[in-house]
Amino acid sequence: MSRSRRFSLPFRDMTGSEISLGAWHFRSDSGDLVLAGESIAGWDYLKPIELHREIDIDGHKVADTCDLPEDATFALTVTAHSPSARYRRLAFRSADLHRKPTKVAVRFALDGTLLSRDLRLETEVLLCAPGKSKAPFVATLPGSRLFSEVSHIDLEGNGSRMPIEIADLASQIPGLSAPHAAWHVLVETTDLHSPTMRALRVFLNSRHTTAIESAQTGDTLFLSLLGADVARRLLSVALQDEDFLTNPDDFGDGSIGEASRRLLRLCFPGQSPKNVAAVAAATPARFESAIQSCMRIGDV
């Protein structure tokens, strides 16, 4: 028994003269757009990365170069890929484009907890509706790639993706009586010199299918809430450590203490660990709201 295989013949694609790609920018903590270049300095995996790019595309030239019919449409897409974190998703898709010059403002946010080391941004022009054409060497399949460009951005620092596991909170975690919780954040040691990726564990409740789906699809609100809870837990542990209160800089890269120090400076800029510990003890609500604010949950 033979199998039929669907394939696409070679087709005309763009030369690159039809499109003008602006540089990638990211939004800094102060709210300004900063040129990303080849790296984002001071990257923190507990913060989302908001990326921007301006693109001018001449639809007339695209259609003429690729010999597309009048009724054909195409779109700009950006796929974000962090190979070391095994993360890949479609981050942006424009509206359908036609035969006219168009300026596209690309904007999207990636949750830093799902990224690690480097980021690969693939900008593509894909055929949406091929239209009616019988001309040879013309793209006819939706999704045909008419143009592709790849940008690489190093994520500086030793931050890595948050370790997330799926577990039955009612039976797999001894002593935890929270069968309906969406997740559980566990810091397994009070030694702040321990590696964060070994000591910090985040469990999604296997009975909570909505939470698992939200994490897998990269739901920004869900991941921001989860990130805020992780930040609160790490800081709560660190602020009970006398060495951290006295000298927060005395912890190596990748350690719980180093991650807590970055969080402290992000959420409580200019304040000493002892002052923040006093706030956490006297007014826990203010402490938790400050963490929520720095994680920008309200911006999601």
Image (tube, helix red, strand yellow):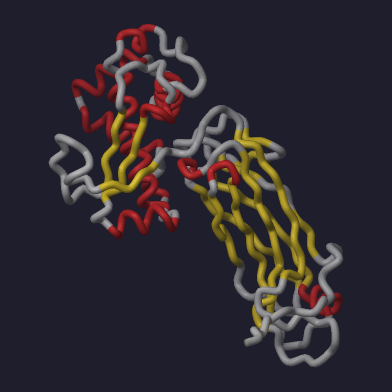
Query: Where 50 sits versus 247, above or below?
Result: below
Residue 241 in the image, given as x and y percentages of width and height: 30, 13
Q: Please tell me whether residue 102 is drawn above or below residue 40 in the rendered image.
A: below
230 relative position to 48: left or right? left
Estimate the x, y position of residue 4 in percent, counting from the top left: 66, 85
Is residue 62 shown above or below 157?
A: below
- Residue lying at the far front of the rendered structure: 1
Q: Position of residue 145 (x, y in %)?
A: 72, 69
Q: Is 180 placed left or right of 117 in the picture?
A: left
x 51%, y 31%: residue: 159
* Viewer-closest of 95 and 199: 199
Q: Compared with residue 193, is residue 264 higher up or lower down, i.e. above or below?
A: below
Give the residue displayed 36% in from the left and 12% down from the top.
244
Quadrant in which the N terminus is drawn: bottom right
Asked whether 8 or 293 is in front, the reply is: 8
Of residues 64 and 258, the one nearer the viewer is 258
Which image quadrant is residue 211 in?
bottom left
Identify the residue shown where x is 65% and y is 45%.
25
**Residue 154 in sight from this viewpoint:** yes
Residue 112 pos. (x, y %): 49, 41
Residue 269 in view = no
- Count every numbered label the image shows and give the total: 0
Q: Residue at x 58, y 41 (%)?
A: 84
